[in-house]
Image: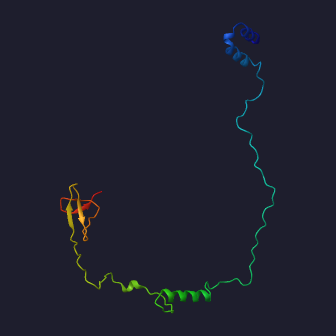
Amino acid sequence: MIRASLDLLQDASSHASMVVRIVHQGGRFRKAMPPIWPFGKKKQPLQLAEEPPAPVIYRKTGDQGISSGSTDQQKEDYKAALSFFGSGNETVERATDQSKHYDGVVASSQPATPAIKEVVDWHHHTDGYHYKKLPDGAFDPVPYVRSQDGKYTPYS
């Protein structure tokens, strides 16, 4: 088969690609090697040659116990803040439960005042919008549109 391939190579130059394929498949140029792996070999990660940190050792001492959580200085600062922001009284009293004094009804000390209607002078412009005339004689730059019920809403 190899000789036939070589003869074909010499006789027909137009079929050179076919001949090369036949020779290659015949095993003349191919050796018994596995195909090339496209990915590199797995490498071991670099290891630093350093010693591990020293362990932390905790020891109990004789002065440990339950602390009060606040010092005299903190108490004085708290009382000073109360006197500054509060009513000026330095005595601290415990808060009482206010919900037992509340029956769900709030009485207002002042009667409700009726809302004062603002009288606005509206002017219809030739552009189809309405403009509000201010008390000083100037006009509000926001155009308004009048709805069917007579209310004015800003144009958007």
Q: Residue at x 39, y 83 (%)?
A: 99
Q: Nearer the viewer, residue 116 or 57?
A: 116
Which residue occupies the extreme top position in the image?
Answer: 11
Q: Position of residue 4 (x, y in %)?
A: 74, 9
Residue 29 vertical placement versus 118 (above, below)? above
Residue 126 vertical placement versus 89 (above, below)? above
Q: Position of residue 131 (x, y in %)?
A: 24, 62
Is residue 35 rendered to the left or right of residue 116? Answer: right
Which residue occupies the extreme left position in the image?
Answer: 149
Q: Residue at x 76, y 10 (%)?
A: 3
Q: Where, quadrant-wise, is the N terminus in this rendering? A: top right
Q: How many marks?
A: 0
User: How is the structure coloured here?
Assistant: rainbow
Is residue 84 rendered to the left or right of residue 14? Answer: left
Q: Nearer the viewer, residue 128 or 68?
A: 128
Residue 156 vertical placement versus 108 (above, below)? above
Q: Where, quadrant-wise, is the C terminus in this rendering? A: bottom left
Q: Nearer the viewer, residue 113 or 133?
A: 133
Q: Position of residue 18 (x, y in %)?
A: 67, 15
Q: Quadrant of residue 98?
A: bottom left
